[in-house]
């Protein structure tokens, strides 16, 4: 996909002017434009967040917060052919980071915000494979995690991934192979960080 | 076997799902585990996509609410348009024009106010459902497509109920599959309102008997604004705001359906005493310390039957399971509640409505580290699919701390 296209779960704005027009309306806090952006990108933002948190409820909350923060900072978005989805995901990334820091600090103090299903045996099977993948992903470099996330979790093409990561398509292909190899080693037990294997 | 060739072979394999036939044995050995790893990732991506779809209705309603809250102040700040002075105005040096502009501006505001109010049907009628509120409502399934069911309630009309992997569905025999809901099933639904006439369900209780979808549904509902002496009826819906400060019930009398705003403390007290609130007979009471249009609830069960229009017979009414006891510990989102029948694990979901006002606690207390361990709680919910002992809570009323000597 060229850098001026906005790819969204099968709905692609082929005309770069559509994406630019939508971005401009979003900057002006046009509610209809933001509703459109929500429909286009919520699933991607949710998916990005979901792979960093352990419960769907937390992911739903953080992904929603990402849109609320984006709307309040709409005037800061500078459309220069950069997909707005990348900006939304950047906001989501910061929110996840803050959320994880907050969880680490608070312990059990925040009684009813703690909805992580760690003690629910019925969840264990459902998140089993995902948890393995999460642990394996922790052994990757930042770039490798990014390429895995974009290519396989958000189902982006090599070209789209290249735009998002500001790299050439060949570099993305090389990075994805090395990332998959690192994942595979981690899943096979060679690459788990100390204490991370289950 | 160069890195570039491996990159190209892998890309082809990822696109087609198979390793290209021209790959050598060494290249195949290199690529096969990578392809398997990518398949695992894609499988999980499909799971997450399904979770995202389930999250969309609630998240969409939340964002729409956010947009409308953000827009409202901005609208108020929009300056009134400057009118070009008319010939007459210029002739009168603008004095009459200033008055005329003010009148015109007031007229515009009045017209906008009328237009804004119009869709709500005036001051007499109101919607029973407010976006983001927690609700409990009863009805009969009239249509089902697996992930969404339509239920009909005689008072509220047709409601769309979104089901997801997070929806707990049970009947008297235990946990049921979501897809098992069929037209004719009498259901009690709890969840969060995502749009007018739509609910993202957290818990559904099903009665075994077959019901008949109501006819002539969706009548106009009036909001009770002034106290009426002797007003009593049967509760058909409860609605609780996310911050816990507002509560509302739909009360059905022999002649009308009324929405009644209820003082939060009174609501919590009522829920603690009548953990199966739908169908309960109540009396509306006024109190001097309450704001105008806000009332208290009192049980009217002791005063004998109240004439109300027929609802689902009590024997057929689907009900949530109820637990009353003292919280002995908490691990993550599971409370251990000591009851007369033993210890019951109670699972708290994000959609669980938790009421504090009868406990002496506030949400601020909870956030600052005050725990509910030692407090008495009244819980309603469904049996958990993983363990019959556990209850997935839809509503928890936290009461005062129990005496420490009990046991």
Image: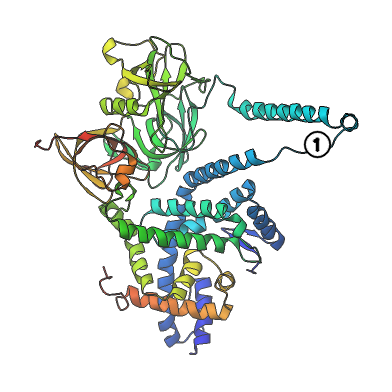
Location of the C terminus of chain B (image quadrant): top left
Q: Does residue B19 lie above or below B123 as drawn?
A: below
Residue B166 locus on image (x, y percent): 37, 46
In the image shown, does A168 or B121 lie closer to the viewer?
Answer: B121
Total labels drawn = 1
Residue A42 locus on image (x, y percent): 52, 54
- Residue A162 placement: quadrant: bottom right
- Residue B288 placement: quadrant: top left
Residue at disc 1, secondary structure: loop
Q: Does residue B189 lie above or below B328 as drawn?
A: above
Q: Is residue A104 visible?
A: yes
Q: Does residue A2 lie above or below B48 as drawn?
A: below
Q: Residue at x 56, y 61 (%)?
A: A85
Residue A39 locus on image (x, y percent): 57, 51
Query: Is residue A180 left or right of A166 when viewed as pictured?
Result: left
Q: Does residue B313 lie above or below A176 as drawn?
A: above
Query: Is residue B245 left or right of B120 when viewed as pictured?
Result: left
Q: Is residue B312 visible?
A: no
Q: Residue at x 40, y 15 (%)?
A: B310
| Structural crowding at the residue carrying mark 1, measured as other residues with C-alpha within 10 Å and reported as few (<14), some (14–19) or many (≥20) | few
Name the residue carrying label 1: B83
In the image shown, does B113 or A159 lie closer to the viewer?
Answer: B113
In the image shown, does A1 or B77 lie closer to the viewer?
Answer: B77
Label 1 is found on which chain of the structure? B
Q: How is the image coloured?
A: rainbow
Residue B22 locus on image (x, y percent): 51, 84
Give the residue furthest to the bottom. Answer: B1
In the image shown, does B289 or B180 lie closer to the viewer?
Answer: B289
């Amino acid at each position: 996909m060229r850098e001026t296209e906005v790819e969204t779960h099968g709905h692609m704005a082929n005309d770069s002017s559509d994406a630019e027009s939508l971005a401009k309306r979003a900057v002006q806090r046009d509610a209809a434009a933001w509703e459109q952006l929500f429909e286009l990108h919520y699933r991607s933002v949710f998916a990005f967040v979901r792979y960093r948190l352990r419960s769907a409820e937390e992911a739903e909350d953080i992904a929603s917060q990402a849109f609320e923060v984006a709307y309040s900072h709409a005037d800061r978005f500078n459309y220069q052919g950069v997909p707005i989805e990348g900006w939304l995901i950047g906001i989501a990334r910061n929110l996840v980071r803050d959320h994880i820091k907050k969880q680490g600090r608070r312990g059990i103090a925040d009684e009813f915000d703690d909805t992580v299903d760690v003690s629910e045996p019925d969840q264990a099977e459902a998140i089993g494979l995902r948890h393995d993948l999460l642990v394996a992903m922790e052994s990757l470099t930042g770039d490798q995690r990014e390429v895995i996330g974009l290519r396989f979790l958000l189902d982006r093409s090599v070209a789209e991934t290249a735009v998002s990561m500001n790299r050439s398509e060949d570099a993305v292909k090389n990075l994805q192979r090395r990332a998959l190899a690192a994942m595979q080693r981690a899943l096979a037990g060679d690459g788990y960080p100390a204490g991370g294997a289950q | 076997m160069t890195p570039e060739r491996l990159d190209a072979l892998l890309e082809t394999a990822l696109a087609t799902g198979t390793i290209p036939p021209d790959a050598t044995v060494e290249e195949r050995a290199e690529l096969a585990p990578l392809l398997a790893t990518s398949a695992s990732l894609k499988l999980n991506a499909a799971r997450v996509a399904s979770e995202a779809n389930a999250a969309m209705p609630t998240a969409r309603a939340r964002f729409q609410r956010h947009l409308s809250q953000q827009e409202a102040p901005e609208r108020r700040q929009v300056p009134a348009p400057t009118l070009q002075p008319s010939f007459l105005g210029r002739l009168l040096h603008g004095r009459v024009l200033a008055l005329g502009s003010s009148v015109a501006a007031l007229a515009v505001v009045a017209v906008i106010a009328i237009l804004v109010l119009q869709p709500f049907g005036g001051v007499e009628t109101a919607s029973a459902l407010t976006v983001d509120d927690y609700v409990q409502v009863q009805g009969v399934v009239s249509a089902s497509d697996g992930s969404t069911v339509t239920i009909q309630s005689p008072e509220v009309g047709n409601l769309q109920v979104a089901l997801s992997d997070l929806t707990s569905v049970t009947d008297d025999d235990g946990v049921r599959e979501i897809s098992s809901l069929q037209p004719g099933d009498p259901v009690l639904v709890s969840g969060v309102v995502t749009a007018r006439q739509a609910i993202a369900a957290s818990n559904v209780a099903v009665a075994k008997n077959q019901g008949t979808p109501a006819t002539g549904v969706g009548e106009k509902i009036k909001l009770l604004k002034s106290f009426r002496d002797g007003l009593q009826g049967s509760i058909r819906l409860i609605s609780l705001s996310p911050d816990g400060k507002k509560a509302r019930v739909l009360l059905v009398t022999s002649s009308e359906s009324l929405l009644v705003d209820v003082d939060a403390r009174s609501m919590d007290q009522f829920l603690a005493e009548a953990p199966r609130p739908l169908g309960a007979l109540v009396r509306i009471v006024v109190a001097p310390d309450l704001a105008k249009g806000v009332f208290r609830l009192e049980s009217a069960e002791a005063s004998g039957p109240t004439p109300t229009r027929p609802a689902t017979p009590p024997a057929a009414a689907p009900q949530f399971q109820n637990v009353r006891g003292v919280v002995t510990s908490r691990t993550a989102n599971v409370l251990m509640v000591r009851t007369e029948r033993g210890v019951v694990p109670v699972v708290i979901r994000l959609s669980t409505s938790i009421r504090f006002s009868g406990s002496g606690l506030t949400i601020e207390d909870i956030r600052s580290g005050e725990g509910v361990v030692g407090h008495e709680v009244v819980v309603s919910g469904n049996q958990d699919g993983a363990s019959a002992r556990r209850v997935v809570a839809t509503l928890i009323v936290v009461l005062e701390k129990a005496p420490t000597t009990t046991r």
